Image: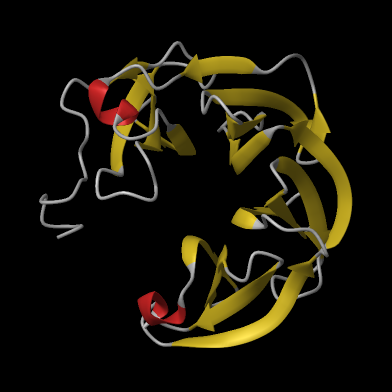
């Protein structure tokens, strides 16, 4: 169903018995889609909009510390953060966090520390920005990886769309590589023992690609 709506780059959270999905949409704003089962979706209200173009790849984080929802947006190749007190509310823009960056993803580690992962534009290297809080940076951003492997450099050299999963003490950095406008766009991952790296790319990358049975 979602695939028929002309949207992409979805991020999903589960809150109070419902799923909330935030995708790239009309290039100027984000709508939220709501579901009880991850199968049937209802389009909800517009939660963020701007007159600028290039509104892409949102990320949502719910903070149990203050019961606030934080939206990490890309607008015109900069990353900012906005906040709302409900998942389908209107998110108020708070501040810019990264200039010349796209595809933000906030991760909170088990010790309560925050890290903002993103791709730098236009060289598409992936960075992590340590955070004092969901809205406040600390220290300097750290480069984690760049498009050096052959599959990442097809058509256009790209590593983007970072996403972190921690499992049994290992940090898995999933990311996309190659041109998003071509059939060569694929997914790989890298691992580390710390959220700030160093990360080692998996030798079997890409793990998802055209012909893998997932993209077709």
In the depicted view, which residue is nearer to us: 39 or 203?
Answer: 203
Residue 38 visible in the picture: yes
How many numbered markers are drawn? 0
Q: Residue at x 24, y 22 (%)?
A: 150
Q: Residue at x 65, y 52 (%)?
A: 61
Q: Nearer the viewer, residue 92 or 133?
A: 92
**In this image, 12 relative to 27: left or right?**
left
Q: Residue furthest front?
A: 155
Identity of the residue drawn at 83% across and 40% down = 96
The residue nearer to you, when weighing 173 against 69, is 173
Q: In the rendered view, tell whether residue 25 sits above or below residue 102.
A: below
Quadrant containing the C terminus is bottom left
Q: Where, by quadrant of the figure, is residue 116 drawn? A: top right
> Residue 208: horizontal and vertical position, in percent?
21, 45
Image quadrant containing the N terminus: bottom left
Q: Position of residue 87 (x, y in %)?
A: 69, 70
Left or right? Give the position of 108 relative to 98.
left
Q: Is residue 17 above or below residue 172?
A: below
Residue at position x 45%, y 80% from top? 5
Q: Nearer the viewer, residue 183 or 130?
A: 183
- Report whether residue 105 is seen: no
Residue 109 figure quarter: top right
Residue 28 position, x and y percent, is 71, 66
Rendering colour mode: secondary structure
Residue 53, horizontal then vertical, whole percent:
72, 58
165 lies left or right of 103 = left
């Amino acid at each position: 169903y979602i695939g028929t709506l002309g949207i992409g780059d979805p991020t999903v959270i589960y809150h109070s018995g419902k799923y909330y999905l935030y995708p790239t949409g009309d290039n100027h704003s984000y709508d939220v889609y709501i579901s009880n089962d991850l199968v049937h979706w209802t389009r909800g209200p517009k939660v963020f909009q701007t007159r600028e173009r290039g509104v892409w790849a949102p990320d949502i984080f719910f903070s149990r510390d203050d019961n606030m929802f934080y939206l990490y947006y890309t607008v015109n190749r900069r990353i900012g953060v906005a906040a709302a007190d409900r998942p389908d509310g209107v998110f108020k823009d708070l501040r810019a966090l990264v200039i010349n960056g796209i595809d933000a993803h906030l991760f909170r580690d088990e010790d309560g520390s925050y890290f903002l992962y993103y791709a730098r534009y236009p060289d598409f290297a992936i960075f992590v920005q340590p955070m004092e809080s969901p809205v406040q940076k600390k220290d300097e951003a750290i480069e984690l990886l760049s498009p050096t492997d052959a599959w990442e450099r097809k058509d256009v050299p790209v590593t983007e769309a970072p996403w972190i999963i921690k499992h049994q003490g290992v940090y898995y950095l999933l990311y996309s590589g190659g041109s998003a406008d071509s059939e060569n766009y694929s997914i790989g991952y890298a691992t580390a023992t710390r959220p700030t790296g160093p990360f080692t790319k998996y030798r079997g990358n890409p793990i998802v690609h055209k012909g893998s049975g997932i993209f077709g």
